[in-house]
Image: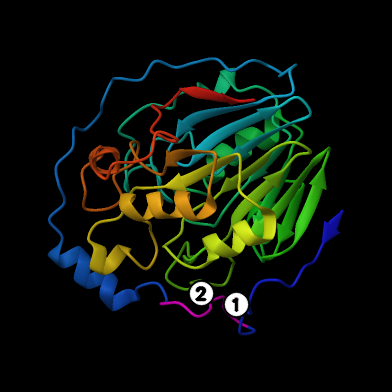
Amino acid sequence: MRNARREFPKHFDGKRFFNPDAPQAPGLLEVIRWKLARRPETSPDFISDIEQSVPPRSIESSGLRATLINHSTVLLQQSSCSILTDPIWSERASPVSWAGPRRRRKPGVAFEDLPPVDAVVLSHNHYDHLDVATLRRLAACEHCTFVVPARGARLLRSKGIGPVQELDWGESILLRDCTIHSVPAMHFSSRTLWDRNRTLWCGYVMEWKERLVYFAGDTAFGNHFAAIRQRFGSPDLALLPIGAYQPRWFMSRVHLGPDEAIRAHEILAARTSIAIHHGTFQLGDEAIDTPRKELARCSKPESFLILNNGEEIGIS
């Protein structure tokens, strides 16, 4: 089932998507300026501090189990439906195996220990969020549905990955007893120099009968958090990104800083939030563990959790 809604503003001009009533993502000249001037904080080549966990094959109770695997990959398990967000098990977030951002920590769950997955939700097509190698492994060993933003299905289908469902902002799909809603984010898309903003980016609200989970994907700070709360109510669990936020002159239009993630948590009135998009790949100028330290320094509420890869929480 696919249901189209029109609560959210226009964000497509007929050729490319855009962030409505908000600053657009930095362009190529700004990217070049950042690359030439950047002085990234140093981080260890690899940090061996992860104890991998083994999630249960199924959940018998009515509660929700959330396991942080790495980066923006979270396993959400409920008795009737298991969902995986932006999965990546590859060593690099890159189109090639020999260059690009390299993994600094191992995944918190070995791929072989992953339980059956009913749905994979993909927030946008950047390499640290849409990892074709991982998606092919999931398509080969699991019969699951892949949910992507508008105009994002073509890439997956060209790689033999499916079945795929596309959702525009405000559209939803029912899988088992979970309704997956596509909601706005402030970001951009591209995998090459020539396809910028040809596909959409989004967050997702996953709605079970007694649970509401919000996955923000990648996003800058904006009024969409208030709109999501107004439309769906306060989530039981929010997955909010905190990393790749420096330098602010460049990153503030596409990524939350830790202080902004706290503001988003408060606007959403989330019962619990988990910090994502940090600790595995160094994508901004801050060191690999600076986001979690800064989040703690900002006096985060106790309900905003910083988990290690492999840690899990239960929402009753």
Amino acid type at circle 1 is His
**Foreground residue among 158 and 256:** 256
Secondary element type, mark 1: loop
Amino acid type at circle 2 is Asn
Task: Assign the C terminus to one quadrant of the image.
Answer: top right
In the image, is 5 to the left or to the right of 304? Answer: right
Q: x, y (%) of residue 186?
A: 48, 66
In the image, is 154 to the left or to the right of 112? Answer: right
First in residue order: circle 1 vs circle 2: 1
**Foreground residue among 314 and 288:** 314
Q: x, y (%) of residue 83?
A: 66, 36
Which labelled disc corresponds to residue 11?
1
Q: Are marks 1 and 2 in contact (CB under 8 Å)?
A: yes
**Would you place residue 27 above or below residue 216 in this image?**
below
What residue lies at 32% left-to-right and 46% top-to-bottom? 101
**Would you place residue 160 above or below residue 211 in this image?**
below
**Would you place residue 172 above or below residue 11 in this image?**
above
What residue lies at 60% left-to-right and 82% top-to-bottom? 15
Q: Which residues are magenta?
A: 15-23
Please rate how many residues cluster around mark 1, counting C-alpha atoms within 10 Å: few if below 14, some from 14 to 19, many from 20. Answer: some
Q: x, y (%) of residue 16?
A: 57, 78
User: Which residue position holds label 2?
Assistant: 19
In the image, is 155 to the left or to the right of 191? Answer: right
Q: x, y (%) of residue 204?
A: 63, 52
